[in-house]
Image: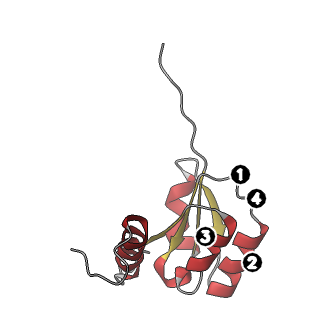
Amino acid sequence: MPLCLFIMIAIIGDRESILPFKAFGVAAFEAGKPEEARELIDSMVPEEYDVVLILEELMQGLEEMGLKTGMNMVAVPGRRGSSGYGKLLLKKNIQRAIGTGGQEIG
């Protein structure tokens, strides 16, 4: 018997970047500034979404909200490409998870 797994995903970003995600059933929320993204995250119920994708340019300064709310927030590049911020956050989270402290990893 096949196992059906439903994952609720949301994305926060500018209209042009989030529009394609709607076609795949992703809940899309428009925000043009980090403050608007913060308000959207504050209004979300953590149990409602398994993963919240946030454009890199909006994620800066919001990292602590993921820890505070318990949401799985992932920085993704927008339509202009990656700034490298998402990769930096991922690296920091890996360091925290494996307990390397300030040591540099790959």
Q: Residue at x 50, y 59 (%)?
A: 20
> What is the CA distance from the residue labelled 3 to the residue labelled 2?
13 Å
N-terminal of the pair, mark 4 or mark 3, is: 4
Instruction: Tell how many labels.
Output: 4
> What is the CA distance from the residue labelled 2 to the residue labelled 4?
12 Å
N-terminal of the pair, mark 3 or mark 2, is: 2
State the residue position of label 1: 48
Res 88 seen here = yes
Q: Residue at x 55, y 82 (%)?
A: 58
Q: Which residue appears farthest toward the right when viewing the image? A: 43
For badge 1, the amino acid type reads: Glu
| Left or right side of 93 for 105 | left
- Helix, strand or loop at mark 1: loop
State the residue position of label 2: 39
Can you tell which of label 2 and label 4 is closer to the viewer? 4
State the residue position of label 3: 66
Q: Is residue 93 above or below residue 84?
A: above
Residues under numbered marks 1 and 4 in contact, where contact means CB atoms less than 8 Å apart: yes
> What is the CA distance from the residue labelled 4 to the residue labelled 3?
12 Å
